[in-house]
Amino acid sequence: METSLVTAEEVQGMKPMKGKAFWLALSSLGVIAWLDGLATTSLSPAIPIVTEKLDGSALEGFWAGTAFLLCATVFQPTFASLSQVFGRKPLLFLVLLLFTVGTIVSGVAHSFTVLLLGRSIQGSGSGGILAMILVVMTDIVTIRERGKWMGIILMQYAVGTLVGPIIGGAFVEYVSWRWIFWVVLPLCGIGFVMVFLFREPHVRTEAITEKLKMVDWIGQFLIVSSVTAVILPITWGGVQYPWDGWRVLVPLILGVFGILGFAVYEKFVPNQPVVAPRIIANRTAASIYFGSVITGVLVAKGYSPLLSGVALIPQSFSVCPASVITGILITRTGRYRWAIWGGWALTVLGTGLLYLLDVDTPTVAWVFIGIVSVFGIGVTMSAGSIGVQATASDSDLPTSAALFTFFRLFGQSCGVAIAGSIFQNQMESHLRKYPDLADRASSLSKNAAGLVPLLQTLPDDANKANIIQSYVDSLKIIWIVTMGFAIVAALLSLLVKGYSLDRAPTPDVGVSPAMPSTDEEKTDSRNGGSGPEEVLSAGPLSQP
């Protein structure tokens, strides 16, 4: 049972003042979050045109999006750990600089090689922006209030992702695809000004040489290279190379062993590890992190690759309100387990309802049925982010917060590949049941997104009806697998313990033991851990 360690009056006294510095910091995060969301989705409608203009192949067009997502994923732990050494403000400048440079390189590209380079640099900056938003929030807002403010920041990001395709499509049709990148540059300038005005809560005073010695360079290399080695073959499988080919299996196996080696190294060697093993060793944190991976898989499998047009509305207008409402309720109650459990229950229900969708289902039903699972995902995202931070010590807070998004993006990368493979196999199997379509079954099943515009050009005959039916039947298998993932995550969420949210933001303090769960406070205190008295001795809140 979750209980609060302090009274309501004490909590009221702990709330930081919302002064000018706080609002400036929050505004800075909102601007760069909106900018990040805009850049993430604006190129999507332009990829076919860009591929044609740069004489690229369909595979290169695929990599224009994949390279961005890959780099946005693998560098998040790196930026979070570097901010512990060099400070928040320098890292904010760095990630925004990477984002800007990548935008410029992409805008001037006259070959796909240069475009992919630019998108990779831009993606690393994008991932850094997401990581630093979470890190800075751990400095300026109490854990109890963090869900509310993170929901508001997420709303800015979602608005950016919503208008991105609209802006991208308009530039492609009426001006030039290069303006998709040029229009971002003035916004980058605004971002630099906002970051310049941002007042860092704590500034480290060590010499630069001392800071460089503090960085876990070997750990940085191991995690970036290993995660890349895992994600690359997953994205290659079934698209560029067969799943059972050596080009997929060899890097995948090396990547898995690399991650295991990274875990061993981080436990025994560095004084300032990239990811302290104690963060993930906590049962509650491990359960929530696994759920974050599943969340990414669900988003990718159910929506992004297959039904992005239909799902855009429920995703954009359900995830954010769900996150904001959940954050507000967590702030008021000081409890988060109910939200994690309720969110996964909604997700399981929603993914199960998706199985009922058929050829004759009205569009409005697709949208509203989709809202159920997406709303559940929004609830779990907000509550899960707070839950993992509640388990972490003050010194581990930035890394634990960034890891939540890292695992979600990792799951999204895996989900795209898994969904594509399942859909392709099922689609081909269903099409082969129809004699007139059997010869084209392989070619038609390779591109799920390409089937939608193709169907619009076909006459209303039996072949078109059979393709649509095969499409829907293939999606039903996706929904079954999706619900299975959601059920596993829901069961694991039962392992989550309730931790107190009533403590101050104390950026960059020394290593301290993780906050005790309310189920184990007395035990921890007897064993020399942090009991309620130590929890309340964190000191007064920093005033932003």
Image (tube, rainbow, N blue to C red):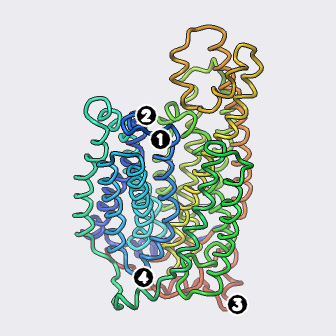
At x 48%, y 36%, the residue is: 312
Tag nearer the camera, 4 or 1: 1
Residue of label 3: 527
Q: Residue 280 at x, y = what percent?
A: 64, 72
Q: On the rendered structure, is 218 left or right of 132?
A: right
Tag nearer the camera, 4 or 2: 2
Q: Residue 466 at x, y = what percent?
A: 68, 16
Circle 3 packing at 10 Å, graded few (<14), some (14-19), many (20+), is few
At x 74%, y 55%, the residue is: 491
Residue of label 4: 85
The answer to which image quadrant residue 282 occupies is bottom right
Q: Under tag 4, what secondary structure?
A: helix
- Marks 1 & 3, CB-CB < 8 Å contact: no
Indicate the amino acid at tag 1: Gly
Judge whether 205 appears above or below 97 on screen: below
Disc on the earlier residue, 1 or 2: 2
Q: Under tag 2, what secondary structure?
A: helix
- Marks 1 & 2, CB-CB < 8 Å contact: yes
Residue of label 1: 61
Circle 2 packing at 10 Å, graded few (<14), some (14-19), many (20+), is some
Q: CA distance from mark 3 to mark 4?
A: 31 Å
Disc on the earlier residue, 1 or 3: 1
Residue of label 2: 48
Indicate the amino acid at tag 3: Asn
Q: Under tag 1, what secondary structure?
A: helix
The answer to which image quadrant residue 270 occupies is bottom right
Q: CA distance from mark 1 to mark 3?
A: 57 Å
